[in-house]
Image (cartoon, rainbow, N blue to C red):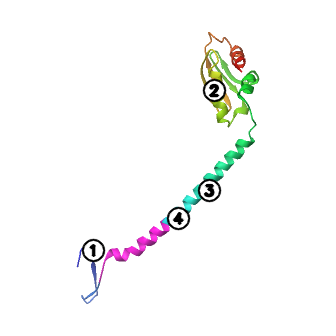
Amino acid sequence: MTATESTVIDPSGAAVAGFSPADVTKPLVDATHSIYQSALGGVEWYVEHWVDIFEEIKAEQAARLPSVQVADILAGLGDARIASDIPGRARLRLPQIRKQTALCAQIAEAVKAAPGVDAVHVSTVTGSILVHYDTDQAASLAELLGAISAQA
C-alpha cells in the first residue's frame, strides 16, 4: 500500500477495500472546476455586454451635445458667469463646455497662449475655467478677457 492509498477496515478487523483519497475527491474537484468555469464564462459575457452598452450610451450622449467651437467660447468669455475674481486668479463658469473633453483641452491651450496667463485648468465636470494670470500684464479680469477674445 502506498502513502496515498488507505484501507477501510470493518468492525471485525478485516480489510474490506483499499482506496485512494484522490480517487474519492476527483469527481468533486472536477464538478467544482466545471461550475467555476461556467460561472466565469457567464460573468465575462455580462461584463462584455455592459461595456458595450456603456460605450453606446456615451456615443449617444456625445451626439446630443451641441456643437460648439473654441472661437465661439473664447469670443463669449465676457458673457461667462464669474464664479470668483481676485487679482491674479479667476474662475469662469460655462455650462456649454461640460462633458466635452476635447473642447475643454482646446480651450485650455487657447487661454494659456494669451499674454499674461500663467496657468489654466478647465474642468469638464463643472464646466469651469480657472485662470491664474500675471497682474502686471493684465490688471483686471476684464483686461485679461479682452486679450483672450482678441486671440479668437
Q: CA distance from mark 4 to mark 1?
A: 32 Å
Quarter holding residue 95: top right
Task: Indicate the secondary structure of the residue bearing disc 2.
Answer: helix
Callout 3 crowding tier (Cα within 10 Å): few <14, some 14–19, many ≥20: few
From the viewer's perspective, tell me whether residue 72 is left or right of residue 42.
right
Q: Nearer the viewer, mark 4 or mark 2?
A: 2
Amino acid carrying mark 4 in the image = Ala
Q: CA distance from mark 4 to mark 2?
A: 47 Å
Quarter holding residue 82: top right
Q: CA distance from mark 2 to mark 1?
A: 71 Å
Amino acid carrying mark 1 in the image = Thr
Callout 1 crowding tier (Cα within 10 Å): few <14, some 14–19, many ≥20: few
Q: Earlier in the sequence, mark 3 or mark 1?
A: 1
Q: Residue 30 or 105: which is nearer the viewer?
A: 105
Q: Position of residue 112 (x, y in %)?
A: 62, 21
Q: Position of residue 80 (x, y in %)?
A: 74, 25
Q: Which residue is mark 3?
A: 49
Decide whether residue 32 is among the magenta residues.
Answer: yes
Task: Indicate the secondary structure of the residue bearing disc 1.
Answer: loop
> In the rendered structure, are the residues bearing label 3 and label 1 in contact, judged by CB atoms less than 8 Å apart?
no
